[in-house]
């Protein structure tokens, strides 16, 4: 007794199983049982997108929140996971689309970029990204675009990283993602 199914001989857990999760429609559309340590096991998603085939996407871990201090020593909250997000156009910048973290500490550390979405910390399996997420048509307020790898890049080489640039287009909501069903 005391053995866990799939446990390796070294005492660490096997990776024969993967957590699965839908895409979450915004950083404020999920809650977890924060009292469970080190990772929560209960996840409630109020709004999002699940694949039409009914299966969720593989993730390395459940979505989570962490706290950090910005350059002005203000306490901030970072929301990590497969969160559908965007950065709406301003007079001098393109709009962006991403699936990943909201208020990522790496963007906030350079000053002025906190409270934005990024593809970093999306926890998605790279195989799922390559096989089923790149090349999808996304419908938003004023048009459509096709996703590329920038929308899902987990280790970009530049910062601030806001995901895939979609040009000077107004984006305040994503309504449809090709091959996914909104809920």
Image (spheres, rainbow, N blue to C red):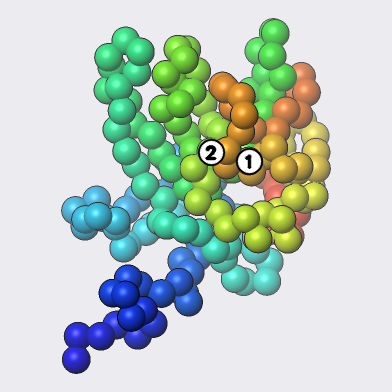
Residue drawn at point x = 69 percent, y = 37 percent: 150
Quarter of the image where the C terminus is located: bottom right
64 or 178: nearer the eye?
64
- 146 relative to 182, above or below: above
The disc placed on residue 153 is: 1
Percent of width and height locating residue 148: 76, 42
144 or 61: nearer the eye?
61
Residue drawn at point x = 52 percent, y = 46 percent: 122
Q: Please tell me how crowded label 1 is: few (under 14), some (14-19), or many (20+) other residues with Cα within 10 Å.
A: many
Q: How many marks?
A: 2
Which quarter of the figure has residue 158? Answer: top right
Residue drawn at point x = 19 percent, y = 91 percent: 1
Q: For mark 2, what is the residue?
A: 120
- 18 relative to 89, above or below: below
Disc 1 is placed on an element classified as: loop
Residue drawn at point x = 45 percent, y = 71 percent: 15
- What's the CA distance linking mark 1 and mark 2? 6 Å
Q: Please tell me how crowded label 2 is: few (under 14), some (14-19), or many (20+) other residues with Cα within 10 Å.
A: many
One can see residue 179 in this view: yes
Left or right: 120, with 136 as reference point: left
């Amino acid at each position: 007794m005391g053995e866990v199914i799939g446990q390796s001989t070294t005492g660490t857990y096997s990776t024969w199983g993967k957590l699965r999760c839908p895409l979450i429609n915004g950083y404020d559309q999920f809650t977890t049982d924060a009292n469970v340590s080190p990772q929560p096991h209960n996840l409630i998603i109020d709004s999002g997108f699940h694949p039409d085939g009914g299966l969720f996407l593989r993730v390395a871990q459940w979505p989570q929140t962490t706290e950090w201090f910005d350059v002005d020593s203000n306490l901030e909250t970072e929301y990590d996971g497969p969160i559908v997000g965007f950065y709406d156009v301003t007079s001098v910048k393109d709009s962006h689309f991403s699936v990943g973290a909201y208020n990522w500490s790496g963007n906030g550390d350079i000053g002025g970029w906190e409270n934005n979405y990024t593809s970093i910390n999306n926890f998605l399996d790279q195989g799922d990204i390559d096989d089923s997420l790149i090349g999808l048509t996304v419908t938003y307020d004023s048009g459509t675009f096709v996703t590329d790898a920038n929308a899902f890049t987990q280790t970009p080489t530049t910062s601030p990283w806001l995901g895939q640039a979609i040009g000077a287009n107004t984006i305040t909501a994503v309504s449809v993602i090709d091959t996914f069903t909104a809920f």
